[in-house]
C-alpha cells in the first residue's frame, strides 16, 4: 500500500476509534453530553412538567437530551424496549422513571453491563429485586411519597373530626410510588378508629379508570364519604363519578400531585386536598445530576424533592 494511502487509512481508523471513545464517554460528535430521559408516559401533566424542567436544564447546561415514553404508564414492556434501544444506541446516561419497580430491574442491569449510568427519578426500584440482581444506580431523585401519604391522611383526620369512611384508588399494583403513599396514609389514620377503609382498588393511575372503579365502589359501598386517590388523575375521574351519582359536595376527594386540573378542582370546591410534588424540579435535578455523573463527579445517592399539602386556601399559589 502506498505510504499516503496507508496514512489516510490510519487517520480514518483513529477517527472511528475516537468517535467510539466519545460515545463510550457519553458524548456525541458535537461534544455535548447525551442523556435520555425515559418517562412512564407523556399523557400526564405530571410527566409533561418533568420533561419541561429537564429540557430547561439541558438547554442551560448544553446537554443533548432525548425524551421517550410509552403511551400508557402500565406498559412496562414498552418502557423496557425503549431502554434496550437506548443501550444499543450508546446513550451516555439514562434517567428513568420506572413503570414497574421490579419489572425494569433487568433492563437497568443491562445498562450496567453496557457501562451506561442510570439515574432513577420519581419512583424507586424495588430494593430486594435490586439486591438480588446486583444492580447499581448512580442516584435517586424524587419525593418522599410515604410522607406525602402521611400529610393527606393527617389532613383527613383534622377535617373529618376523626370520622370518615374511605375508599382508596391505588396505582399500579406493586408500584413503589403508590404503595408508599398508601402506607403513609394508613399510618396517619391508624390512631383514629373512626376513620375506616371500606374499599381499596387499583385504577392504574388513569382518569378513565378512576371514574369506572370509583363508580363501582359507590354502588357497592354507598356509605363511603371520602376517596383518597394515589394520584390526581384518578381523583379527577372519581370527581366525575361523584357528579354522575349526584353526590357532588357530599364526598371528600383527596389526591396527590397538584396538577393544574386538580388545583382548579380545589378552587371550585370539588376536591378537598392534594399533595404538591414538583416534577419540574425532578427533571431539572435529574439532568444536573446526569452531567455531574458523566463528568466523573461524586453525586449523592438520593436527592429528595420538596412536597406540600395543597387545599383551596393555597391552590393558586
Image (cartoon, grey):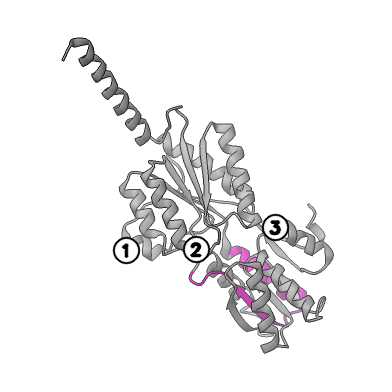
Q: Secondary structure at mark 1?
A: helix
Q: Residue at x 62, y 57 (%)?
A: 43
Extreme-left residue of the structure: 1
Q: Is residue 138 visible?
A: no
Q: Residue at x 17, y 11 (%)?
A: 2
Foreground residue among 266 and 207: 207
Q: Is residue 162 magenta?
A: yes
Residue at label 3? 259
Span of residues in magenta = 147-174
At label 2, counting other C-alpha atoms closer than 10 Å, the crowd grade (few under 14, some 14-19, many 20 or more) is: some
At label 3, counting other C-alpha atoms closer than 10 Å, the crowd grade (few under 14, some 14-19, many 20 or more) is: many
Residue 10 lies, with reference to residue 119, above or below; the image says: above
Residue at label 2? 75
Tell me residue 55's x, y (percent). Answer: 59, 40
Give me the C-alpha separation between circle 2 and circle 1.
Answer: 24 Å
Q: Is residue 215 visible?
A: yes
Q: Secondary structure at mark 2?
A: loop
In the figure, residue 208 lies in which quadrant?
A: bottom right
Q: Is residue 149 magenta?
A: yes
Residue at label 1? 132
* Dot placed on the residue nearer the N-terminal end, 2 or 1: 2
* Dot placed on the residue nearer the N-terminal end, 3 or 1: 1
Amino acid at each position: 500500500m502506498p505510504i499516503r494511502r496507508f496514512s489516510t487509512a490510519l487517520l480514518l481508523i483513529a477517527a472511528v476509534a475516537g468517535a467510539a471513545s466519545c460515545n463510550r464517554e457519553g458524548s456525541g460528535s458535537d461534544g455535548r453530553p447525551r442523556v435520555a430521559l425515559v418517562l412512564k408516559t407523556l399523557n400526564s401533566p405530571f410527566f409533561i412538567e418533568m420533561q419541561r424542567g429537564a429540557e430547561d436544564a439541558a438547554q442551560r447546561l448544553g446537554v443533548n437530551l432525548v425524551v421517550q415514553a410509552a403511551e400508557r404508564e402500565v406498559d412496562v414492556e414498552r418502557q423496557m424496549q425503549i431502554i434496550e434501544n437506548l443501550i444499543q444506541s450508546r446513550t451516555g446516561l439514562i434517567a428513568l422513571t420506572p413503570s414497574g419497580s421490579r419489572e425494569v430491574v433487568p433492563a437497568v442491569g443491562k445498562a450496567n453491563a453496557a457501562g451506561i449510568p442510570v439515574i432513577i427519578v420519581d419512583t424507586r426500584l424495588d430494593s430486594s429485586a435490586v439486591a438480588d440482581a446486583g444492580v447499581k444506580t448512580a442516584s435517586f431523585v424524587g419525593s418522599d411519597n410515604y410522607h406525602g401519604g402521611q400529610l393527606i391522611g393527617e389532613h383527613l383526620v383534622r377535617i373529618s373530626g376523626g370520622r370518615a369512611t374511605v375508599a382508596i384508588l391505588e396505582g399500579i399494583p406493586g408500584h413503589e410510588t403508590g404503595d408508599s403513599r398508601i402506607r403513609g396514609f394508613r399510618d396517619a389514620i391508624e390512631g383514629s378508629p373512626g376513620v375506616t377503609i371500606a374499599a381499596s382498588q387499583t385504577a392504574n393511575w388513569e382518569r378513565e379508570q378512576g371514574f369506572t372503579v370509583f363508580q363501582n365502589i359507590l354502588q357497592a359501598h354507598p356509605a363511603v364519604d371520602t376517596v383518597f386517590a394515589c394520584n390526581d388523575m384518578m381523583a379527577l375521574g372519581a370527581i366525575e363519578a361523584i357528579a354522575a351519582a349526584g353526590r357532588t359536595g357530599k364526598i371528600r376527594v383527596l389526591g396527590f400531585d397538584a396538577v393544574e386540573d386538580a388545583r382548579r378542582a380545589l378552587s371550585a370546591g370539588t376536591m378537598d386536598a392534594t399533595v404538591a410534588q414538583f416534577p419540574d424540579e425532578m427533571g431539572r435535578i435529574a439532568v444536573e445530576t446526569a452531567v455531574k455523573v458523566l463528568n466523573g463527579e461524586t453525586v449523592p445517592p438520593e436527592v429528595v424533592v420538596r412536597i406540600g399539602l395543597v387545599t383551596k386556601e393555597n391552590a393558586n399559589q
